[in-house]
């Protein structure tokens, strides 16, 4: 019998062959204007299968706006977003989105298990009766982020790190091809940071496309293949070691803030 190569792994390999493979996601001259002010402008980027991209920039740089456009929950005013060459006009089951913690209403009365199960509904693009299998899968995803014993607990009663883990479980349950995470390391404890890094590494190895926003330069460098320095426009893009330079940090974060991040000298 012929031995099948898992699709996810073969995709990872393909993505490393370079130019011959179309990017899984692409933005072309993307722009978003709120009233008179533009949040992002002229963003043209490729996101490959099996590759992790960190979006780095100060508060207000447009990181969340860009992620929302990639997810299809925010319609751009200019340009386009593509998923496997198809225009993204609305959220897709193939794209999982973990919002910034501050964007979530944590008072909403819902249990940890039900938050995780939302991943299944997102995958099916509809609300359907929860099967025994769905519950088992949700509990397994919660176990993966070490939150299984909190399954019946209200989400609002958890710590920041625990809430982040539950949202990661929800994203895992969606079994998406693209994972978008907004500030996943922000306001969480060190064990959660380590766990999120591990999950992202596993997803990348499985050939997923990962894009996360962060203003934490250490995290931007540690787990990404590509960094995009953003300040309304793309300031720099490429390998983290070439993007996270003093020169780029100064032009993006401004002189005062850049001195807080003395990571490496300009290339
Ligand atoms: N819904 C909105 N209405 C008006 N302005 C917005 C809205 N969302 C974001 N902005 C503005 O767009 C800019 C970029 O915001 P955002 O994408 O949240 O940046 P970041 O995530 O990098 O901190 C900011 O100036 C912000 O105030
Ligand atoms: Mg943001």
Image (spheres, rainbow, N blue to C red):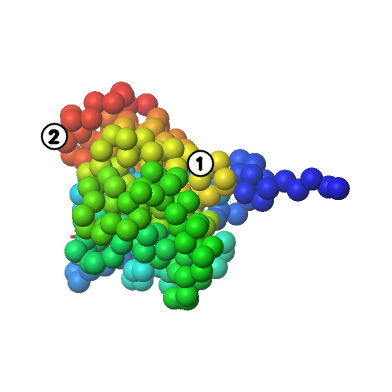
In this rendering, would 116 be left or right of 4? left
Q: Is residue 65 visible?
A: no
Depicted 50 relative to depicted 264: above or below: below
Residue on which the image places disc 1 = 202
Kindly give the residue lying farthest to the top in the view shown. 265
Q: Measure the C-alpha gap from mark 2 to mark 1.
A: 36 Å
Q: Residue 145: name its quadrant.
A: top left
Depicted 21 relative to depicted 241: above or below: below
Foreground residue, 240 or 28? 240
Depicted 138 relative to depicted 237: above or below: below
Q: Is residue 165 visible?
A: yes
Q: Nearer the viewer, mark 2 or mark 1?
A: 1
Circle 2 — which element? helix
Residue at image position (18%, 29%) is 259
Foreground residue, 208 or 83? 208
Disc 1 crowd, CA 10 A, few/some/many (<14, 14-19, 20+): few
In this rendering, would 66 be left or right of 18? left
Q: Give the mark, 2 or 1, whose residue is nearer the N terminus.
A: 1
Circle 1 — which element? helix
Disc 2 crowd, CA 10 A, few/some/many (<14, 14-19, 20+): few
């Amino acid at each position: 019998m012929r031995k099948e190569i898992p699709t996810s792994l073969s995709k990872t390999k393909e993505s490393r062959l370079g130019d011959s493979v179309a990017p899984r996601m692409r933005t072309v001259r993307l722009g978003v204007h709120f009233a008179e002010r533009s949040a992002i402008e002229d963003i043209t980027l490729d996101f490959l299968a099996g590759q992790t991209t960190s979006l780095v920039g100060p508060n207000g740089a447009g990181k969340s706006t860009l992620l929302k456009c990639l997810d299809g929950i925010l319609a751009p005013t200019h340009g386009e977003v593509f998923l496997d060459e198809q225009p993204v006009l609305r959220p897709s089951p193939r794209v999982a989105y973990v919002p910034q913690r501050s964007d979530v209403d944590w008072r909403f009365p819902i249990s940890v298990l039900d938050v995780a199960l939302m991943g299944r509904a997102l995958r099916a693009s509809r609300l359907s009766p929860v099967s025994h299998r769905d519950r088992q899968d949700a509990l397994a995803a919660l176990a993966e982020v070490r939150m299984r014993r909190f399954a019946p607990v209200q989400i609002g009663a958890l710590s920041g790190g625990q809430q982040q883990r539950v949202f990661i479980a929800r994203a895992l349950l969606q079994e998406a091809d693209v994972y978008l995470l907004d500030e996943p390391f922000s306001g969480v404890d060190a064990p959660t940071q380590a766990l999120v890094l591990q999950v992202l590494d596993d997803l990348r190895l499985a050939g997923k496309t990962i894009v996360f926003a962060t203003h934490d330069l250490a995290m931007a460098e540690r787990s990404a293949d590509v960094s995009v320095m953003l300040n309304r426009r793309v300031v720099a893009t490429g390998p983290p070691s070439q993007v996270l330079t003093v020169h780029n940090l100064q032009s993006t974060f401004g002189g005062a803030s850049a001195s807080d991040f003395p990571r490496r000298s300009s290339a």
